[in-house]
Image (cartoon, rainbow, N blue to C red):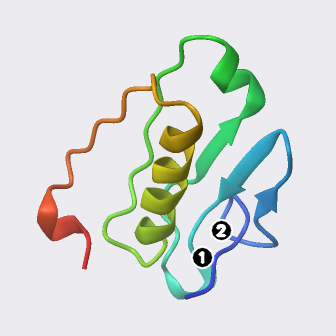
Amino acid sequence: MIIRGPDGTGEPRFTPTIVAFNGNASVGESVEAFMITFDDLRVPHRDSCRTNLCDYELLVLYALARLATYFPTICLISDGGKSSVQ
């Protein structure tokens, strides 16, 4: 699996203030960017990330699980169901 920057190209961004990545656009594995910033954590925020079952979906789930361990009061909702993770 290759992950790219938010637009599906370049390098993913992992810094103290932003996490942003997407699938690899050059092979059709890029759908929507997963992006969360430090500012998103300071105010009520609602966002989504559709992956269409592309390989980077697993990384989105890991990132959200890690986020929830540091910020246990956040609310995470999924419409993917059990079959979305393979």
Tell me: 75 left or right of 70. Answer: left
Q: Position of residue 23 (x, y in %)?
A: 56, 72
Query: Tag 2: residue type?
Result: Gly
Circle 2 residue: 8
Q: Is residue 66 left or right of residue 79?
A: right
> Which of the 4 image quadrants contains residue 2?
bottom right
State whether residue 7 is above or below residue 8: above
Report helix, strand or loop for mark 1: helix
Q: From the top left corner, tell me how far across and down residue 20 is, in percent.
A: 69, 53
Between 31 and 84, the residue placed more toward the observer is 84
Q: Which residue is mark 1?
A: 25
Please give left or right for residue 74 compared with residue 37 in the image.
left
Give neighbour class at mark 1: few <14, some 14-19, many 20+ (Cα, 10 Å).
Answer: some
Viewer-proximal residue among 37 and 65: 65
Residue at the far top in the pictured view: 43
Q: Residue at x 76, y 30 (%)?
A: 38
Q: Position of residue 31 (x, y in %)?
A: 47, 62
Contact between marks 2 and 1 (CB within 8 A): the answer is yes
| The one of 63 and 73 positioned closer to us in this rendering | 73
- Residue type at numbered disc 1: Ala
Q: Position of residue 52 (x, y in %)?
A: 32, 65
**Residue located at (39% from left, 61% from top):** 51
Q: Is residue 33 above or below residue 36?
A: below
User: Quick one: quadrant of the N terminus?
Assistant: bottom right
Residue found at x 21% / y 54%: 80
